[in-house]
Image: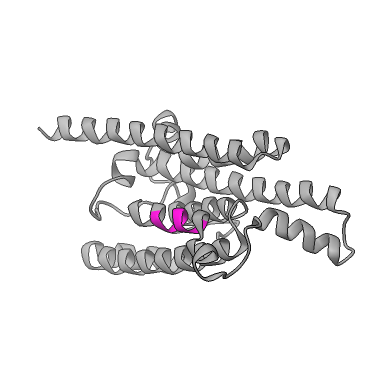
Amino acid sequence: MAINAIIIVLGFFSPWIDLWGIGKRITLLEGLALELSRLGLLRFTVAAPVVTIVAALIAAIGAILRVWGTAWLGPTTVIHSQMLAGAVMADGPYRYVRNPLYLGVWCMVAALAFLMPVSGALFTMTLITFFLLRLILGEEAFLITKLGKPYQNYLHVVPRLIPRLRTTLRPTGNKPHWLRAIASELTPIGVFVAFAVFSWSYDDHLMEKVITVSFGLSLVARAFFVGKRQDSNA
């Protein structure tokens, strides 16, 4: 989370614009709308809402994947500071894609990138993609070592990042915890709300405040789950 946050903050501030004059302080959302208008594809008054809707849809996918994945895996496992290896998880979204949580993070950050300067958005998406791929490959190697053949079989059946529409895997009987998942994933939910509800004010600062508040609330919720885990281990 800390590394993700640093990458996102750097993308928003884009210090290279003021220090070295690289790029301009125009958001990706506005830049894409202007480019669509310049190319004669859409009037700017139409292009801006269209780009905003695209960003909201990406944010919605990110929020759905994060909540769905956390509901099945459990928030205490998701926020654990170390890699854990229990049984192979093949329920919920994990029947269709191996890394719904990382894919959800990528979509959430991609939505946030629309509020960043263009150069900041490129910087953020490049680094976050590299970082998440590194995490995925490292986690897969770890789980192969710990879980062996069952996990290797799972790797052959379920794709890494591009979800399949159908699956031959049968549910294993685990139960989702939706309320706890929603509480621990308030950040991607807040990003979606910022675009779906507050973007129509065309006030980027207001949207950023909504996202910041949702991030703060998610930290409180995660601290609560960490506390409960420690109490149960005591």
Q: Report whether residue 130 is seen.
A: yes
Instruction: Indicate whether 154 appears above or below 114.
Output: below
Q: Is residue 197 magenta?
A: no
Image spot of residue 194 (x, y percent): 60, 38
Q: Report whether residue 153 is seen.
A: no
Picture quarter with the C terminus: top left
Image spot of residue 118 (x, y percent): 62, 62
Q: Residue at x 47, y 53 (%)?
A: 105
Image spot of residue 221 (x, y percent): 35, 31
Q: Is residue 1 left or right of residue 212?
A: left
* Magenta-colored span: 6-11
Image spot of residue 149 (x, y percent): 28, 67
In this view, the residue in front, 148 or 62, is: 62
Q: Residue at x 62, y 58 (%)?
A: 25
Instruction: Indicate whether 132 appears above or below 63.
Output: below
Q: Is residue 7 magenta?
A: yes
Q: Is residue 80 left or right of residue 205?
A: left
Q: How is the image coloured?
A: one colour
Q: How many marks?
A: 0
Q: Residue at x 77, y 56 (%)?
A: 33
Instruction: Tell me the quarter of the picture where residue 99 sits.
Output: bottom left
Q: Residue at x 22, y 68 (%)?
A: 145
Instruction: Indicate whether 173 appears above or below 104.
Output: above
Q: Is residue 1 left or right of residue 61?
A: left
Main SS category, magenta section: helix
